[in-house]
Image (cartoon, rainbow, N blue to C red):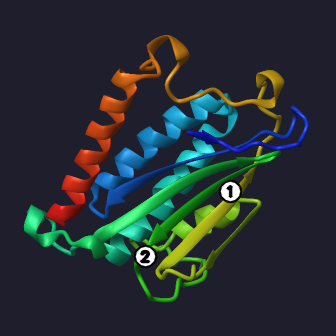
Amino acid sequence: MRTRPSAAPCHSPRAWDRLTLVALPTAVSCARAFAICTLRWWGVTHVTDDALLVVSELVTNAVKATGPGTPYPTWTDVTANHILGLQLRLDGPSLYVEVWDSGCETLAAARTPTPDDEGGRGLLLVQTLATRWGTYRPTPGGKIVWAELTLPRAPALAAGRLPLRVPPHIRVPAGKEREQVESALMQRVLDGLRRM
């Protein structure tokens, strides 16, 4: 989790955290687990149910738009185009759920499905739960679908700061050990990128 410095008072915390996933059906459950942990850590569990529904619907749409298209893909079926990103952003009285995918198709507007439709209720559900929602195309490409959920009460955070992901009592101390951990992490990231 990253906390952004802000001159805002304690009742207007700002933070964000993100997760990158492969656009497979399992991404939905991973995104839900990430959202549960993040909202619990931020102390905004009172919107968990609504946030989980929104996360599920937006990630499901991203998987359908950019996934490999096979029910049981192998690692060779997955390319850099099959990636999606989920970002949760806390900004004062609002929680934003933002999902990026590499798709270039235009997102259909929420519609009222007929009783015989097996699907098509996702965006209608998002529209019902969210204060506002929309889509836009970022400069690097792809699309972002976002939804804003209003928090019924502000998180109770000490001095306007959000907790760090790694608590101080288990964090690697500064010095040679931390440098080794950071170098090993960066090496794993580079190795993974080279294999793509």
Q: Secondary structure at mark 1?
A: helix
Query: Residue 103 at what x, y percent from top left?
Result: 41, 81
Residue type at mark 2 is Asp
Q: Regarding mark 2 in the picture, which secondary structure is present there?
A: loop
Q: Which residue is mark 1?
A: 129
Q: Is residue 13 left or right of residue 28?
A: right
Q: Residue at x 88, y 43 (%)?
A: 7
Mark 1 is on which residue type?
Leu
Left or right side of 15 for 63:
left
First in sequence: mark 2 vs mark 1: 2
* Quadrant position of residue 68: bottom left
- Observer-nearest residue: 151 or 2? 2
Based on the displayed image, in which of its 4 quarters is residue 63 positioned?
A: bottom left
* Mark-to-mark CA distance, 2 and 1: 23 Å
Q: Residue at x 49, y 57 (%)?
A: 86
* 108 horizontally vs 64: left or right: right
Above or below, comparing residue 10 to residue 186 in the picture: above
Q: Quadrant of the C terminus?
A: bottom left
- Within 10 Å of disc 2 (Cα), the crowding (few <14, some 14-19, many 20+) is few
Above/below status of 129 relative to 106: above
Q: Residue 97 location, x and y as percent?
A: 60, 56
25 lies left or right of 2? left
Q: Position of residue 27 (x, y in %)?
A: 33, 54
Q: Which sits in the foreground, 146 or 112? A: 146
Residue at the (39%, 71%) spot, across then down: 118
Quadrant that contains the N terminus:
top right
Residue 91 tag number? none
Q: Which residue is mark 2?
A: 116
Image-quadrant location for residue 112: bottom right
